[in-house]
Image (tube, helix red, strand yellow):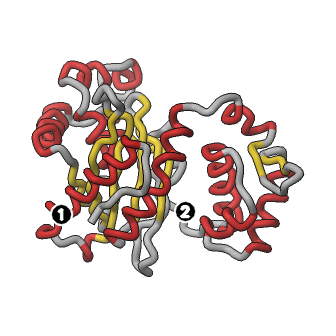
Amino acid sequence: MSTEPKTPPAYVVTSADHALRAAVMLQLEGGLTVSRVAERLGVARSTAHRLLQTLVYRDFAVQDDQRVYHPGPVLQLATHSQSRTSRLRTAALPHLQRLVDVVGESANLTIRTGDTTRFIASVECAQALRVGSREGMVFPAHRTTAGLVLLAALDPAGVDELYAGQRYVEHPEEQPDLPSLRAQLARVRRAGFALNNGLSERGVVAIGVPVRDADGTALAGLSISMPTVRYDRHRLPSLVATLHRAAGAIEAGGGRGDMH
């Protein structure tokens, strides 16, 4: 399975894209109303209703007596328990929205599995020119902002071990330049944040910090992303400080917090 960054097809089938995003939302969140899906996808309630009814028809969703939609048989794996990822996502979403309100750019929460990262939550900003939702997408860890933050939480030997697996023995062309990656991760460790200028996608700048558990283990990466044309390097210290405050609010699991 390729883990190269995904490029949107030339002709995106919008209805299919919306249906897939709704399925991911159900899998990660558990229960959604038509209004909530319409709001998150930016579509009319009637469109959201048709999407959800299609998911019901194909067993991706079920509807309860209160007209709330839940994962169906196809997505049952996500409903067996409230996984750590689900709990983290639920706790983080209000803080991601607050972060977007404060900085005016899109925000993401990402976890690492081995040498890949998955975006488990995305909140888009309202600007016409913006970085779109990455929710549900998987990318190579060394090519994402949060991936760099999470790789930097490993010791150097752990990074070497991660990229010495059988897949890289069989496909050495997929292995990152390890000396360069080690140096990059050392800079991230020293700084306490990652700056990604065009690494994941040309024309996009992203900044990320870790979200830690009570023991200090990095659970996820919290990041904001913006078009390069809007990035002002003089704002970097304040953006990093805002990200750290938002990460702290997620870690505390309390209210919305003050990120000003």
x%, y% of residue 200? 33, 54
Q: Which amino acid type is marked by label 2?
A: Pro
Question: What residue would you read off at disc 2?
Answer: 9
Quote the CA–CA distance across marks 2 and 1: 36 Å
Question: What residue would you read off at disc 1?
Answer: 238
Q: Which amino acid type is marked by label 1?
A: Ser
x%, y% of residue 86? 56, 39
Question: In which image quadrant can residue 19 be found?
Answer: bottom right
Residue in the foreground of this view, choosing between 114 and 83? 83
Q: Is residue 43 left or right of residue 219?
A: right
Q: Is residue 50 above or below residue 161?
A: below
Question: In which image quadrant can residue 52 be found?
Answer: bottom right
x%, y% of residue 54? 83, 57
x%, y% of residue 221? 35, 44
Residue at left offset 22%, top offset 49% = 194
Residue in the foreground of this view, choosing between 130 and 100? 100
- Disc tally is 2
Residue at left offset 35%, top offset 25% = 168
Residue 249 visible in the picture: yes
Q: Is residue 239 left or right of residue 58?
A: left
Circle number at residue 10:
none
